Amino acid sequence: AQKITQTQPGMFVQEKEAVTLDCTYDTSDQSYGLFWYKQPSSGEMIFLIYQGSYDEQNATEGRYSLNFQKARKSANLVISASQLGDSAMYFCAMRLPTGNQFYFGTGTSLTVIP
Amino acid sequence: KAGVTQTPRYLIKTRGQQVTLSCSPISGHRSVSWYQQTPGQGLQFLFEYFSETQRNKGNFPGRFSGRQFSNSRSEMNVSTLELGDSALYLCASSRQTGGGTDTQYFGPGTRLTVL
């Protein structure tokens, strides 16, 4: 069963604008971790931000914030003030406490337009 | 602190050959996971090693195997290569302190082309 769903295959955003990338997840566990990664064309997966299931505050890391809505099982990534270098694939992932396997979504391709 | 390193970065092989990819995790990280990424299938989990033991395995044929050494470095091997094995192979390491907070950090990947 699909545990992470990213419904936006591709997104466009104007430079300096904010953009939200959607992610929903499916688990019956109470404890889990949610992650976002960025993958530029070079291929390396870059860790961006983490949200724990028990964290009451939304995680923020610089221009990245994670809009965590536990009841809706969503963990959307918000990028503020988009830059040309933000053009990349973005993956949402979930880690469950049992084992160390990460479940990844299919990714969203973000293109920042000058 | 050095990141995850993978060697080689690029590899070209022919069908039927075998290949070994190497991954050195971040210092202090004990868990190493391997992923295959293709345009058609996306990111797929291969296996995870912790303390030299395979803990998790994805749905891949037995041609795909791996191991981990006492210094946490890991290798994965693909025997009898097929055209469909052409992919970006990503290695990720984590400290594995337990719980859901453990973050995986990825290496730059090895791009394998099978001709």
Image (cartoon, rainbow, N blue to C red):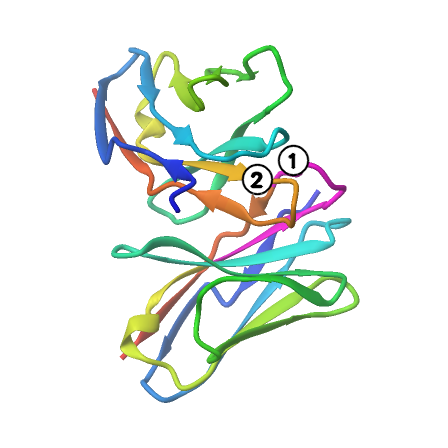
Q: Residue at x 23, y 19 (%)?
A: A13
The x and y percentages for residue A112 are 25, 24
Q: Quadrant of the C terminus of chain A?
A: top left
Label 1 and label 2: CA atoms lie apart by 6 Å
Q: Which mark is residue A111?
A: none
The x and y percentages for residue A50 are 57, 27
- Residue A66 shows in this picture: no
Question: Which kind of residue does numbered mark 2 sit on?
Answer: Arg
Q: Which mark is residue B100?
A: 1
Residues at marks 1 and 2 touching, judged by CB atoms closer than 8 Å: yes
Same chain shared by disc 1 and disc 2: no
- Residue A102 shows in this picture: yes
Tell me the quarter of the picture where residue B68 sits: bottom right
The x and y percentages for residue B94 are 66, 46
Host chain of mark 2: A
Residue carrying label 2: A95
Q: Nearer the viewer, residue A110 or B67?
A: B67
Host chain of mark 1: B
Secondary structure state at the residue bearing disc 1: loop
Question: Which kind of residue does numbered mark 1 sit on?
Answer: Gly
Horizontal side of residue B115 vs A64, given as left or right: left
Crowdedness of circle 1 by 10 Å Cα count: few (<14), some, many (20+)? many
Q: Residue at x 33, y 43 (%)?
A: A106
Q: Is residue A21 found inside the magenta-colored segment of the image?
A: no
Magenta part, dominant SS: loop
* Residue range (magenta): B90-103
